[in-house]
Image (cartoon, helix red, strand yellow):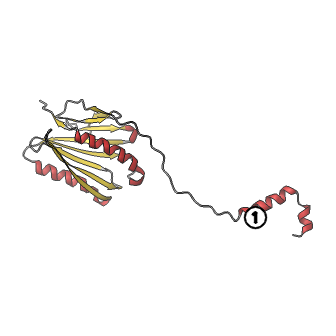
Amino acid sequence: MNNKNLRSLPFFSLLLVTMLFASCHHHYIPRPRGYFRIAFPEKSYKDLTLKVPYTFKIPVYSYTESDSLNLDQPYWITIQIPENHAQIHISYIRLNKNLAAHTEFSRALAYKHTEKASSIEEQIFVNRAKNVYGTLYTIKGDAASPMQFYLTDSVSNFLRGALYIKEVPNFDSLRPVINFLSQDVLQLVESTEWKNIK
């Protein structure tokens, strides 16, 4: 195309052609995938007010319900935390000289997540004043349950708990939620006491 033909093009056509050629040299750089910001409620706790042989503190933004899958176990409950799509399943067993079997079963349930977990940390819990002893399992990686625990007085009471988040297990995206709920699980463990229920 010679200069004479260029002068005959309307000004806007020339501008459009110039912009097209200039834009060909721009390189697109994709942005990394991000996650939505998650808003958390303020931490506050209330006492568990059920007629069960144990008590502990639960978050004010949670509620309890009977374990619908185990109606023959009246002391099994589920703590629902709806804002975070989470549940803490609590099961209670009256010991009958079978503590070792229950502690090993709890350990086996925690280690069932080994295939998906990048690590499993065990933390011993001892509260002599309240006669509560146990182990807390922190399961890191893309496991369905990031925290599990058992508590006992070693003679009569055995309590097992497991935190579940009802989302696709992706540790990186769920890490803020897991960190937030871990404090609630620790509060539950540290505030546990046994009650005499007839």
Return the residue found at the far front: 129
| Horizontal side, residue 23 vs residue 165: left or right | right
Q: Position of residue 94 (x, y in %)?
A: 12, 40
Question: Where 193 sits versus 6, above or below?
Answer: above
| Horizontal side, residue 153 vs residue 160: left or right | left
Question: Where 26 sits versus 187, above or below?
Answer: below
- Residue type, mark 1 in image: Phe
Identify the residue under disc 1.
Answer: 21
Q: Nearer the viewer, residue 57 or 12?
A: 57
Residue 150 visible in the current orientation: yes
Q: Crowding at label 1, few (<14), some or many (≥20) Cα neighbours within 10 Å? A: few
Q: Secondary structure at mark 1?
A: helix
Residue 69 visible in the current orientation: no
User: Measuring 88% from the left and 60% from the top, which residue is drawn there?
Assistant: 9
Q: Nearer the viewer, residue 99 or 136?
A: 136
User: Measuring 29% from the left and 36% from the top, which residue is drawn there?
Assistant: 58
User: Measuring 20% from the left and 38% from the top, which residue is drawn there?
Assistant: 192
Q: Position of residue 89 (x, y in %)?
A: 27, 42
